[in-house]
Amino acid sequence: MKPVIDNAAFSFHALSPELIFDSLLSIGIRIDSGLTALNSYENRVYQFHDEDRTRYVAKFYRPCRWSNEQIIEEHQFTKQLVDAEIPAVSPLTINNTTLHEHEGYLFALFPSVGGRQYEVDNLEQMESVAMLLGRIHQLGAKKPFLHRPTIGLEQYLYQPQEIILSCHFIPQKVQSDLKTILAQLIKTVEHYWHNDWQPIRLHADCHAGNILWRDGATFVDFDDARNGPAIQDLWMLLYGNQQEQRLQLDMLVEMYQEFFELSES
């Protein structure tokens, strides 16, 4: 019997170790180790090795978060990056597909890639990452995602505002102040927001935790990939006070623009 997946709660309650073993066995992968859970906010991700001592990473997607078409677009993007010799981790093709389903759960299998943590205060590493992001965006600008969303105010402000203000768990005594503060925040963002930029395919969650260092940077976890402005993949690399961030941004842009022009608008 297939498990009942609670769509409202985006539940993983039925994703047992037995189901994970059976899911991988359904695509010909027999686990010969324990499952090591890896950090992931939205999904469930596990590292293991098979009977041949080959290490893999299996990702089970949170139900109802992405459609099949959206996940496949992510996979196609990473495959294009790998084909262009840009260091990114792309899912393995098994039985002519990268996306699999078992007992109601969608999952993908990736090679296990080792590496050190990207050092946010290492300017040489930052320069390398900036140039690679330029190459990623050069490829990402060739065509947009068709099924994945585009960064905008509707998804990031208006919809969350509606959800928050309709939440019954917010004490009544703070609802009025919260509504006022949210309205002020949205008005400020609207003042600075503009749409005169060309959306390109982005990593969109390009923080230090999604960059491995192996004699150079390797980009992982494109789960949040979407269309948007190029700056989205640059600002997360900044750290420190405002003066330090300005110097870093100048350096990032200089190296980035060796491969792709960053719009000033």
Image (cartoon, rainbow, N blue to C red):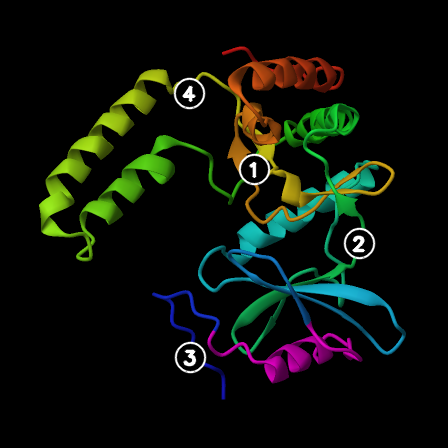
Q: What residue is at 22 percent from the left and 26 percent from the top? A: 184
Q: Name the residue under label 3.
A: 4
**Image height check: is 117 above or below 71?**
above
Which mark is in front, 3 or 1?
A: 1
Q: What residue is at 90 percent from the left and 74 percent from the top? A: 52
The one of 230 and 144 positioned closer to us in this rendering:
230
Which mark is in front, 4 or 1?
A: 1
Amino acid residing under circle 2: Val
Amino acid residing under circle 4: Asn
User: Picture quarter containing residue 159?
Assistant: top left
Name which of mark 3 and mark 1 comes first in the sequence: 3
Q: Mark 2 points at which residue?
A: 113
View extreme (top): residue: 264
- Label 3 SS: loop
Q: Is residue 193 left or right of residue 30?
A: left
Name which of mark 4 and mark 1 comes first in the sequence: 4
**Image height check: is 89 above or below 243?**
below
Tell me if label 3 and label 2 are in contact, CB under 8 Å.
Answer: no
View extreme (right): residue: 52
Distance from Cα at disc 3 to Cα at disc 1: 32 Å
Q: In this view, does 1 lie to the left or right of 34?
A: left
Amino acid residing under circle 3: Val
Q: Mark 1 points at which residue?
A: 204
Magenta stretch encompasses residue 18: yes
- Label 2 SS: loop
**Image height check: is 236 above or below 108?**
above
Magenta stretch encompasses residue 32: yes
Q: Could you tell me residue 252's position as x and y percent?
A: 67, 19
Name which of mark 2 and mark 4 comes first in the sequence: 2
